[in-house]
């Protein structure tokens, strides 16, 4: 044995995992076609399935974060405009 492990690119893992999730071919067929061990495909498939929920959660949290930042900026602008309005009202004697 050479002692070195082969490393696979994330894109390759995703491609193989997606095909395994589709289930159009058996693990043995996929392993033969891509020259990887079936256990690796099983691990990649499990990781992909578990990671799907996180993908949607990140997107939702990102939207909430953007919304919170927008609200903060708008509140700051409202405060600034209120101060300017009050200053101008005093300046013109209202």
Image (cartoon, rainbow, N blue to C red):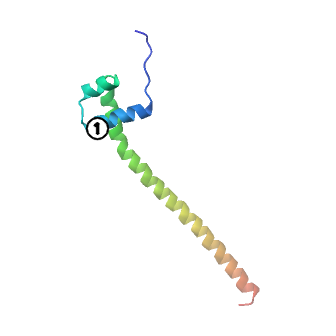
Image quarter where the C terminus lies is bottom right
According to the picture, the residue beneath numbered tag 1 turns out to be 21
In the rendered image of this protein, does residue 86 appear above or below residue 48?
Answer: below
What residue is shown at x 45% (from left), y 53% (from top)?
61
In-front residue for pair 7/12:
12
What residue is shown at x 33% (from left), y 30% (from top)?
43
Residue 71 spot, x, y in % from top left = 54, 65
Residue 30 spot, x, y in % from top left = 29, 28
Question: On the image, which quarter does residue 76 sit in?
Answer: bottom right
Residue 93 spot, x, y in % from top left = 74, 90
Among all residues in the image, which is located at the extreme right?
Answer: 91
Among all residues in the image, which is located at the extreme front?
Answer: 33
In the rendered image of this protein, does residue 38 appear above or below residue 71?
Answer: above
In-front residue for pair 36/34:
34
In-front residue for pair 70/83:
70
In-front residue for pair 56/22:
22
Question: On the image, which quarter does residue 21 sit in?
Answer: top left
Quick one: SS at disc 1? helix
């Amino acid at each position: 044995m050479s002692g070195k492990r082969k490393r696979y690119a994330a894109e390759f893992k995703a491609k193989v995992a997606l095909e395994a999730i589709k289930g159009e071919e058996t693990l043995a067929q996929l392993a033969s076609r891509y020259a990887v061990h079936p256990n690796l495909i099983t691990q990649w498939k499990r990781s992909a399935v578990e990671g799907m929920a996180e993908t949607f959660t990140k997107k939702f949290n990102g939207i909430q974060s953007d919304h919170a930042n927008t609200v903060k900026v708008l509140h700051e602008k409202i405060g600034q405009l209120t101060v300017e309005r009050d200053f101008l009202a005093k300046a013109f004697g209202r």
